[in-house]
Image (cartoon, rainbow, N blue to C red):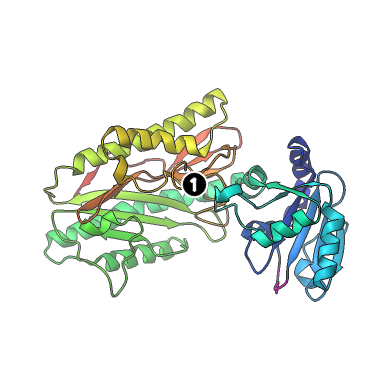
Amino acid sequence: MREPHRLHEIQDALTAAQIDGWLLYDFKGCNPIAAGMLGFEGLSSRRALAWIPAQGTPVALMHAIELDAWRLWPSTWGRRVYQSWQSLESEIHSLVNGRRVAMEYSPGDAVPYLDRVPAGVIEMVRASGATVVTSAELVTRFYAVLSANQLAAHRRAAEIIAQIGPAAQRRAADAARADSPLTEFAVQQWIVAQFDVHGLITSHPPNVSVGANSANPHYEPAIDRHALITMDQVLLIDLWAGEPGQPFADQTWMCTIGDPIDADIAPVWNAIREARDAAIALVRAAGVTGLALRGAAVDDAARAIISARGYGSAFTHRTGHSIDARDLHGAGPHMDGFETREERTLLPGVLFSIEPGIYFTGRFGMRTEVNVAITSDGDVEVTPSAIQKELLRL
């Protein structure tokens, strides 16, 4: 386990929630939450479990041929070895029988990012005499929360990409005005090169989309699929990157090049900006008052603004996603009451995006994206430090 010093914190949380223990399960990476917490190294091709009780000593349940993968497991904690499926089920029964057990399970698949344990494993654990409950709040607190150093790394990356995104748009606009337009793919590759210059990495190349392509929220230009960035169009750039091994920053920047004739452009920009700011204001207000705030409530606040402006049907995705130390789309609370049923509380230490968008197929789309961190002392920080307030007209 990567953070054995947190055992007492986990056990206190289990006791407070009246849960007898947390059963971590992984098989070939099906549960990255368990794998990340347990810190496997080397080959891990068999079922692996760890029982963290509310009281007492944790126990690892490992296959006989993969003991080496558990070398980070503290030597003072328990180890049990199984070989056959019968011995595996017997050991599970001895650990969980009659107990209330937390697992990475989301009832009704309400939050897919939490629903990591296969249904058959849940059935096996229940057949062993356990009552299975969701580990949702435990995952937020002990997997998704960032340290001060991780937040500082995110902050540094955010300031860098806040320079790269608008610079890429100016580069595209200058080329269009010079009658030598760049392709979406060329601008995308320039951004990736800038990440390299600044020592940042990304999980996937950025979204550079012009005109009608901007109406596709997850558009991906490629060497064999791209458009020219010409005059009198909307240009959307969504880019994400971070220092190696650190949380990413994720931003979307909007501009127009020349004078697009669509009358909806200014009203749409105003609507998404106001929706973003309403979501941020709600998070700030909760921080001041100490009110427990759910991710779904943040989504509701942004969606209400866009719906009131008459664009509700064109806001086709959640307001934001968790960003944790391991994944751009993390395992913490999402700003979502639309695609999924996110009921988790926003705890100090979580990081997430706020990115309302409006999309008209065949015409254009707009999104504005910033990241929000709730610091360890409960303050609310928005990154980058200078967010986009007006639609860039280049």
Q: Looking at the picture, tell me which residue is in the foreground, 163 or 296.
A: 296
* Residue that appears at 36% across and 58% down: 218
* Magenta highlight: main SS: loop
Quadrant assignment for the N terminus: bottom right
The residue tagged 1 is 340
Percent coordinates x, y for residue 82 in the rendering: 84, 69
Q: Which residues are magenta?
A: 41-46
Percent coordinates x, y for residue 13 in the rendering: 74, 39
Residue that extends furthest to the top in the rendered view of this protein? 289
Vertical side of 324 occupied by 187: above or below? below
* Residue that appears at 73% across and 68% down: 47
Q: How many marks?
A: 1
Q: Looking at the picture, tell me which residue is in the foreground, 198 or 58.
A: 58
**Residue 189 lies in quadrant:** bottom left
- The amino acid sitting under disc 1 is Thr
Q: Is residue 204 magenta?
A: no
